[in-house]
Image (tube, helix red, strand yellow):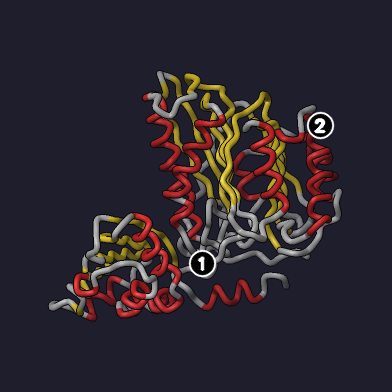
């Protein structure tokens, strides 16, 4: 059934960047009809073997596609020849039918490319628990194969949206030993966002000459600092996947994380991943405000992240901010319920530059008017110090409005 067009998020960037062409990979897009005539599937083919890395959901009800990719990375040594991604159906909780869909899709790609099955990667996003006809995606792959090279990476970003209201894209260019190296990526995600090793779906391509091991190490490290620091609703998807592919067409070959030539690439990759992660929060279902929560003074960085996530996921905090209500008592509640070590008499809270609590009580110069004004902005910064150590973490989230209920109440209708 075709799904209605979503109203664009008020937090959306003014424009979508035009992504550069990454040498060594070509794309095609098509439609299985899940969203009317809109494209809902893409394929990628690498001209030569590319280095591949991936991070995936830890959900125990993960999709068959996630299982496939994990095993393919292990069996194939992190080498990629092709990718197939569809939207509209997540192929999760579909039992034998989900495996049959994957087998048919992989077989079609292997036949067309002439590669081993462990060099093909899959993903799906959409409704959970509805089996697909086994050859639906495979037949679409064969249909659009002749058009490889006709689609851009921007087309790819639009083809795997579900409740997204805008395509999310980013790119950077870095210099490695005198060579210009490009990194470009697209992600989708709007609801069911509190990743646990990834976000909804994300694909990053680079022409850097990196080994699979280097790609995997960088992707895992920066996922923890970016995609794993965002939340819309505290729910982890069954299909969460982020993959990085390096076509090895530019720059020096690097197979050592300590190689100084890698520094520029690593900086660029982290910047791109952070940009993409925050774009997902900007498109949170029903969101009207982007909220950054920084926690300091925790016993460890891990503890700080738990506290920050508790604040970010509190419906009471999120609804108060939706109404521009500087109800800092709800932040105190969200800190306390984590059972993390804190010094109650040292806790201090700020909305932007406005301090609302200090040393375990309301700030002496507290101004309800000033605090409320800080909460009226489209972008709100909250800082919390818990006085227990040197740990710190930052998490990004959005407010919770009736729009979230409207979108999810009609998701399948």
- Compared with 138, 236 (above or below) is below
Q: Splitting the image into 4 quarters, where does residue 285 fall?
A: bottom right
Residue 68: x %, y % from top left: 71, 45
Residue drawn at point x = 48 percent, y = 52 percent: 227
- Compared with 93, 263 (above or below) is above
Q: CA distance from mark 1 to mark 2?
A: 40 Å
* Placement of the N terminus among the 4 image quadrants: bottom right
Quickly name the residue at label 2. 112
Q: Nearer the viewer, residue 179 or 81?
A: 81
Residue 5: x %, y % from top left: 65, 64
Quickly name the residue at label 1. 234
Residue drawn at point x = 78 percent, y = 40 percent: 106
* Label 2 Cα neighbours within 10 Å, binned few <14 / some 14-19 / many ≥20: some
Q: Nearer the viewer, residue 9 or 276?
A: 276
SS class, disc 2: helix
* Placement of the C terminus among the 4 image quadrants: bottom right
Residue drawn at point x = 18 percent, y = 78 percent: 366
């Amino acid at each position: 059934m075709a799904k209605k067009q979503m109203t664009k998020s008020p937090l959306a960037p003014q424009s979508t960047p035009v992504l550069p062409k990454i040498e060594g990979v070509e794309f095609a897009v098509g439609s299985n009809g899940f969203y009317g005539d809109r494209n809902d599937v893409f394929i990628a083919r690498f001209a030569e073997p590319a280095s591949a890395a991936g991070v995936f959901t830890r959900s125990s009800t993960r999709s068959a596609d996630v299982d496939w990719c994990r095993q393919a990375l292990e069996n194939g040594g992190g080498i990629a020849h092709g990718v197939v991604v569809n939207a509209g159906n997540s192929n999760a909780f579909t039992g034998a039918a989900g495996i049959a869909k994957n087998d048919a899709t992989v077989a079609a790609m292997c036949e067309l490319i002439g590669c081993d099955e462990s060099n093909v990667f899959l993903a799906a996003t959409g409704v959970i628990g509805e089996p697909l006809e086994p050859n639906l995606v495979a037949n679409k792959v064969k249909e659009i194969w002749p058009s490889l090279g006709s689609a851009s990476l921007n087309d790819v970003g639009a083809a795997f949206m579900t409740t997204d209201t805008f395509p999310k894209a980013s790119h950077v260019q870095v210099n490695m030993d005198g060579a210009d190296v490009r990194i470009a990526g697209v992600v989708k995600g709007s609801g069911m966002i509190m990743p646990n090793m990834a976000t909804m779906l994300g694909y990053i391509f680079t022409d850097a000459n990196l080994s699979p091991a280097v790609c995997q190490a960088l992707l895992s490290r920066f996922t923890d600092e970016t995609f794993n620091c965002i939340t819309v609703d505290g729910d982890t998807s069954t299909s969460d996947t982020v993959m990085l592919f390096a076509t090895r067409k530019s720059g020096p070959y690097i197979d050592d994380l300590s190689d100084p030539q890698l520094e520029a690439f690593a900086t660029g990759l982290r910047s791109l991943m952070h940009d993409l992660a925050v774009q997902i929060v900007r498109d949170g279902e029903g969101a009207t405000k982007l909220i950054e929560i920084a926690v300091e003074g925790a016993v460890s960085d891990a503890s700080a992240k738990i506290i920050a996530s508790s604040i970010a996921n509190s419906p009471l905090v999120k609804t108060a901010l939706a109404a521009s209500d500087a109800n800092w008592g709800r932040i105190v509640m969200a800190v306390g319920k984590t059972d993390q070590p804190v010094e109650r008499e040292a806790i201090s809270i700020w909305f932007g530059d406005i301090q609302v609590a200090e040393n375990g009580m309301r700030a002496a110069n507290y101004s309800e008017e000033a605090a409320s004004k800080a909460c009226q902005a489209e972008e709100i910064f909250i800082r919390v110090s818990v006085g227990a150590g040197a740990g710190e973490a930052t998490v990004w989230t959005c407010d919770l409005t009736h729009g979230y209920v409207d979108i999810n109440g009609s998701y399948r209708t």
